Image (cartoon, grey):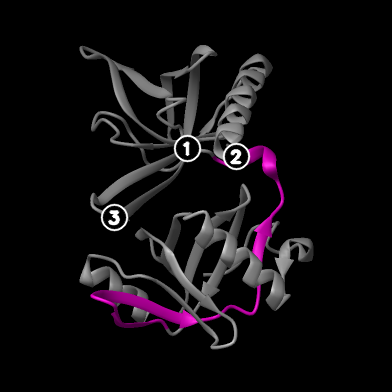
Amino acid sequence: MADGSSEERDSRFIVHSRREIAAIFKSVMAERQMVTAQPGHGHALFVTRLLLADAASNVCVVDAARDPGMNDALVAAHDVVFVSRQDKLRVRWTAARLRLAPLGDGLALYCPYPDHVFRFQRREFFRVQPTDAEPATCSFVLAGRGHVPVELVDISIGGVGLAGMPAELDVSPGSRIDMCTLVLPSIGTIGVSLTVRSVEDVEEPGRGVRRRVGCGFVGLPPRYEVALQRYIMRLERLGKV
């Protein structure tokens, strides 16, 4: 999968130092951050954990997928894209020649240690996950059904990640969805319109394969941006406690 975004073509975001890469991976593991793995040029991805990153042995290890077909696709792929977060920043690296091998009582995927990692510096659009302490809800108004809730996976100033979308909604990339309502603790209710940016089938540990829909806000008024920023900053502070 090509590194095609403008950020990934900017050398400021590329980390080559083995010591710095090791620090990034150590933080990802210490924070128990989720890692998504996606075969190059594929649409399906799954959520895993980074178990080991050893520069001296030139190896990284992540949990294997529950689905044998996903493991086969990862091993057969020309390259696999991994994405995670470190200190609230998105990090991304690519690996090739994955192999499936035993680890403890289960299986794991082994891959070469990367020679560089992308670390994106734009904090204002990083996504945070609502917590039990600061829950947020999302719903759509559908004819004959009223407000239909969906799962709000993550949120940023730029948009939301959703799961459990109603079958009546067109979630093909590029489609627009109106009549969306967000309810944010201590902030209130925000009515927004969305445009679908991505649709991915994600394997989640213990939950199987679920469809996630990434959406961007359409014409979000400045006052709503301020409200979202306050909510996101509150989640950041809770995450640091």
Q: Amino acid at mark 2?
A: Lys
109 or 163: which is nearer to us?
109
Say if residue 41 shows up in the picture. Answer: no
4 horizontally vs 11: left or right: left
Q: Position of residue 14 (x, y in %)?
A: 72, 67
**Residue carrying label 1:** 129
Q: Quadrant of the C terminus?
A: top right
Q: Is residue 112 magenta?
A: yes
Q: For mark 1, give the secondary structure.
A: loop
Tell me the quarter of the picture where residue 140 sits: top left
**Of residues 44 and 125, the one drawn nearer to the viewer in this rendering:** 125
Residue at the image position 47 percent from the left and 37 percent from the top: 129
| Distance of label 3 from label 2 (alpha carbons) | 25 Å
Residue 195 in percent (x, y) is at: 48, 33
Which kind of residue does numbered mark 1 sit on?
Answer: Gln
Residue segment shown in magenta: 98-127
Q: Quadrant of residue 120?
A: bottom right
Q: Which residue is mark 2?
A: 240
Identified at 37% across, 41% down, the residue is 172
Taking depth in this image into account, of 193 and 74 the one nearest to the observer is: 74
Vertical comparison of 136 with 53: above or below: above
Label annotation for residue 205: 3
In the image, residue 220 lies at what x, y percent? 60, 22
- State the CA–CA distance, disc 1 to disc 2: 14 Å
